[in-house]
Image (spheres, rainbow, N blue to C red):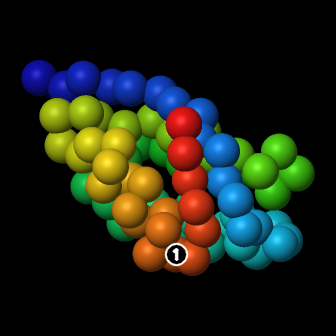
Amino acid sequence: MSKIVAKKLKIEGMHCTSCAMSIDMDLEDLDGLKEARTSYAKQETDITYDEEIVDLPTILNQIRKTGYIAQE
């Protein structure tokens, strides 16, 4: 059984729309992540994920590996 969660994360360190695309592409590699939409203009990412498969700390760590800081 899945537990779908939607969250909005604030992102620090983006300089352009390519930064936002990089975050989305790296997040799509995570099992359990259903959707990631990052907005450079808003400096945030909307994510939808299955909490039974992936947790928020894993998602935040993936964003950090991409070179950005994310927080709720």
Asked whether residue 1 appears in the rendered view, the answer is: yes
Q: Between residues 72 and 28, which one lies in front from this camera angle?
A: 72
The image shows residue 9 at horizontal and vertical percentages of 59, 41
Decide which of 6, 70 is in the foreground and name it.
70
Is residue 26 visible to the viewer in this orientation of the structure? no
User: Up-down: is 48 above or below 68?
Assistant: above
Is 69 positioned to the left or the right of 63 in the image? right
Instruction: Indicate the secondary structure of the residue bearing disc 1.
Output: helix
> Relative to 39, is 30 on the left or the right?
left
On the rendered structure, is 44 left or right of 24?
A: right
Residue at x 76%, y 74% (from the top left corner): 18
Image quarter of residue 55: top left
- All told, the count of numbered labels is 1
At a point 81% along the width and 57% down the height, the residue shown is 40
Quarter where residue 19 is shown: bottom right
Given residues 25 and 71, the one toward you in this image is: 71
Query: For the view shown, which residue lies furthest in the left direction?
Result: 1
Circle 1 crowding by C-alpha within 10 Å: few under 14, some 14–19, many from 20: some
The image shows residue 35 at horizontal and vertical percentages of: 49, 44
User: Tag 1: residue type?
Assistant: Thr
Question: Which residue shows up at 30% across the image and 55% down it?
Answer: 58
Q: In the figure, 41 relative to 34: above or below?
A: below
For residue 32, above or below residue 66? above
- Of the 4 image quadrants, the one containing the N terminus is top left
Q: Position of residue 66 (x, y in %)?
A: 52, 75
Residue at horizontal 66%, vertical 53%? 11
- Residue 72: percent from left, percent from top: 54, 37
Residue at which label 1 appears: 66
